[in-house]
Amino acid sequence: MSTGIARSYRGAAGAAGPLVFVERTHAVALGEWVRLEMPGERSWQGQVIDAGERYTVVQLLEEPLGLSPARTRVTFTGDVARATVGRELLGRAFNGLGAPIDGLPPPVGEALRPLAGAPLNPAARLPPSDFIETGVSAIDGMNTLVRGQKLPIFSGPGLPALELAAHIVEWARAPRGEPFAVVFVGIGITARERREFLERFERSGALERSVLFINEMRDPTVERLIAPRVALAEAEFLAFEHGLHVLVVIADITHYCEALREIGAARQEIPGRRGYPGTMYTDLASLFERAGIVRGRQGSVTQLPVLTMPDDDLTHPIPDLTGYITEGQVVLSRELHRRGVFPPVDVLPSLSRLMNAGIGQGRSVPEHRQWADQLYALYAQGREARLMAAIVGEAGLVAQDRRALAFVDRFEHAFIGQGRRRRTLAETIAAGWELLDALPRDDLARIRDDTWERHRQEARR
């Protein structure tokens, strides 16, 4: 808790990279802002990340070039790290610390909110009951993104995860026109990518309902850790104070975890798996668990984090721990990308655990579920038939497997491969039925007779 009283100390015990160690401090709070000054020279800003019995660890928000610990005056300001939040930030772009990068003045905002957010009572969480339309058929139809959910995109090096994230920022909507906003967080992106994002979102009109927080590769490491927290403070304010349904897109979580490992090494922490700190699970949970719907509030916070799996390894600590915390995953396929399919989503290992709760109400729930299950079943059968055809040839397959094999190509190029064009959920459902209509009724074992008859009657209208 913040003391509200500034305390100054002359000299620090030492420094290691962006970390400064101060001995025998009094009443220090985690997350407290710190000012470091060398009289007559320059100053730095930092934040308390550890308050031990003997040492307090201060993490600098900029490079410590020229800092001499013994000659530094360290002032603990008594105030925890806060972010300026408000509707005024919509249409703006900021760096990872919340400073403007769009050439406009700093926002006045409506409030200052702690970066850590307010703890959410589990009893105050409401169960999911609706979805967010991303405009991507492989997500909306097969792995629906539900309001209040955290659904990561698992990518690999060289796959177009950032481009898919940019399309989702442009295409995402609340399906019935409810108040909606996007908070985009770029972590460790290049200067070229930053320019492209800003120009693209402004050109498409998406910037008007979005807030951008961009951390570049050249920015200090600690900024990668702060950027998503600044963004989530804004998202929570828009959702729970203004009643907006907010989608938070974070790219790339891998860069965030690399920053955790770098800081952990500087603190001389005992490393965990593959050198990542043992606290990484808890740290990631402190971000992802800020998604949700709150009882008595109109809005929601939904997260779509993007992470790059090193060596395409699903068992790597970053995707492994992320999978434990989140409710499913959308997996990108290198094979589909080589075939020119965009977005290259592999629907078989992809999963949205909350899909059934968010795909609709009444009759549409079981019908959507049957439709999706049938597409899954045929695609899985066709993938197996593709492997078998490589051994015995297509002529050696039974008739049903040959039809499933033909279905795979149509499904990948006509349904998953939608190109750079947004699809509404109705268009996605129609595209799936068009593929199913080309098959004999006997092949559609997952579609009940009443659902099939209703579909045929609607098709004849």
Image (cartoon, helix red, strand yellow):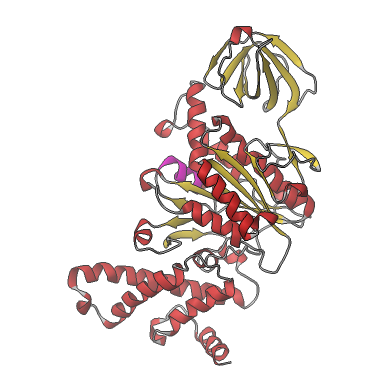
Q: Is residue 394 above or below residue 175?
A: below
- Dividing the picture into quadrants, the one containing residue 460 is bottom right
Query: In the current view of this chain or complex, which residue is farthest to the left?
Result: 392
Q: Residue 321: horizontal and vertical position, in percent?
A: 48, 43
Residue 424, located in which quarter of the rendered image?
bottom right
Left or right: 312 as drawn, with respect to 164: left
Instruction: State the residue at coordinates (28%, 71%).
Output: 385
**Which secondary structure type mostly characterizes the magenta part of the structure?**
helix
Residue 377 makes an appearance in the image: no
Task: Provide residue 279's location: percent of width, then percent of height.
Answer: 53, 32
Q: Is 48 covered by the magenta stretch?
A: no
Boundaries of the magenta span = 316-323
| Front position in the image: 220 or 3 | 220
**From what the image shows, is residue 122 above or below residue 18?**
below
Q: Is residue 236 above or below residue 226?
A: below
The C terminus - image quarter:
bottom right
Quick check: 325 left or right of 122? left
Q: Is residue 312 visible?
A: yes
Residue located at (37% from left, 76% from top): 407
- Figure quadrant of residue 285: top right
* Residue 172 screen position, x and y as percent: 61, 61
Quadrant the N terminus occupies: top right
Which is more toward the observer, 319 or 82? 82
On whether residue 319 falls in the magenta region, the answer is yes
> Residue 89: horizontal and vertical position, in percent?
73, 47
